[in-house]
Image (cartoon, rainbow, N blue to C red):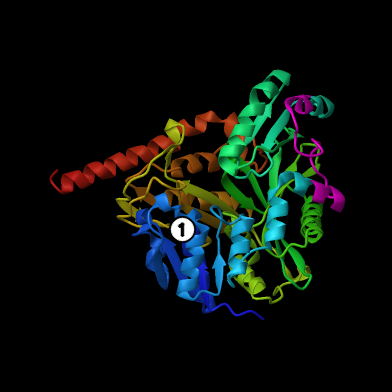
Amino acid sequence: MIRIRKLLIANRGEIAVRLIRACAETGITSVAVFTDADRHALHVKKADESYSIGPDTLGGYLNMHRLINVARAAGCDAVHPGYGFLSENPDFAEACESRGIRFVGPSPEVIRRMGDKVAARAAMIEAGVPVVPGSDGNLESLEAALATAEKVGYPVMLKATNGGGGRGIRLCTDPASLERNYERVRSEATRAFGSTEIFLEKAIVNPRHIEVQILADAHGHVAHLYERDCSIQRRHQKLVEIAPSPQLSEKQRSHVGELAVRAAQAVGYQNAGTVEFLLDHDGSFYFMEMNTRLQVEHPVTEMITGIDIVQEQLRVARGLPLRYRQDQISRRGFAIEFRINAEDPEHDFLPSFGRITRYFAPGGPGIRTDGAIYTGYQIPPHYDSMCAKLICWALDWELLLSRADRALRDIGVFGVKTTIPYHLAIVNHPAFKTGNFDTGFIAAHPELTQSPATRSNRNVAVAIAAALAAHHGL
């Protein structure tokens, strides 16, 4: 068994706070890192120890060598990458292991293989996991792309082979749009992922986006923790996540769980990961990708299963077996997560960075808030706009919706624009309440950005600001 007494958290924001809490519950000393812009961040205040990694001009949270040097100097046994940044960088995992530091995640080989979308497709085909029809490998030319598109049929998707996070993807509806987008996607892939390699898949129009959380250890045990529905998304970026999906039958749920376990076993996966699928309107599941890390939306799975995924990650990293076998994992009720972003939905989700003048989290039964903000906190403009996650749980779908509505009205974030009123509009939309929606939901309902919930929230904020000004004689 490998001992982990001290853990470097190579991340920031709410996920760093989440990891610090897991360390506190397992007797592990937490070590935070921070850039100059994050000197007053909540994860710095919460960690047992914290160290500066200088300005972002030195690479910030992407400077793997600086992070590893801090881990070594602080006497850390392991590094947890969280999500984003270096979490799916096989070079970082290799560098950690070469310096005698345990990387909390899968092996560099698996990260590299599953990060290459073409290699991942090949592995799934070999394992008998269905994939979306498309190119056999990377596209060598525009002519090859046109020939493949003609074979599988339009519309098609051009995708960066090493892509992720919704970037490096373009929908092509005909040969002309494919010709226009071919070099654009190659350029985007180069800028975002350092590679010009792209491939092509048939576009599944407005599918359901279903992903399955898996856990695997070094002793041959692989289990799934049921699925999450991530269909509510904007421009391939998830906004709302639900577990389990209100759209699946028990037969479908069992089938997609088995596919996810088969996918993990096929590549010798260890630690926590997520296998993502597209569910077509004819009921067919297609493998999309595998995220070799902890997901932003992992709390909804924790809420319905009672399993702490981060603690299981740490157990696996220590060489211990999973505490749960598949037949010991059950689910109860429904959970939903709202990404609270510092953005203005009324103005095309323009980032709204600035000072949090007042903040209070909701409470009550079935409510969890994972956040990184506090009253007086200055949201820096250098990073992702997500500042908190609101997670709600209830025994059934109808109660979940009413509880989510109440919690979204309870939470208060003032001083910046947020997506809270937008989420209120979604929760109260008749089409969402049916539990029957797909990835086209947001595009089909542009009126959500101008909903009564959005306007009433703005009016309340204005009234509070006026009252405070009057109180202070301004």
* Location of residue 39 in the rendering, given as x and y in whole percent from the top left corner: 35, 59
Name the residue at the left extreme: 473
Is 49 situated above or below 244? below
Q: Amino acid at mark 1?
A: Arg
Q: Assess whether residue 438 is covered by the magenta stretch.
A: no
Magenta residues span 122-146
Q: Assess whether residue 135 is covered by the magenta stretch.
A: yes
Residue in view at x 32 percent, y 46 percent: 415
Residue 308 shows up from this direction: no
Q: How many marks?
A: 1
- Badge 1 marks a residue whose secondary structure is loop
Where does label 1 land, which residue? 12
* Location of residue 228 in the rendering, given as x and y in whole percent from the top left corner: 66, 52
* Location of residue 1 in the rendering, given as x and y in whole percent from the top left corner: 67, 81
Instruction: Name the quarter where the C terminus is drawn.
Output: top left
Q: Crowdedness of circle 1 by 10 Å Cα count: few (<14), some, many (20+)?
A: many
Q: Nearer the viewer, residue 277 or 55?
A: 55
Q: Nearer the viewer, residue 285 or 13?
A: 13
- Residue 173 occupies quadrant: top right
* Location of residue 98 in the rendering, given as x and y in whole percent from the top left corner: 61, 68
Relative placement, left or right, of 454 versus 443 is: left
Residue in view at x 71 percent, y 65 percent: 270
Q: Nearer the viewer, residue 186 or 275?
A: 186
Residue 442 shows up from this direction: yes
Relative placement, left or right, of 432 versus 329 is: left
Name the residue at the top extreme: 176
Residue in view at x 64 percent, y 57 percent: 90
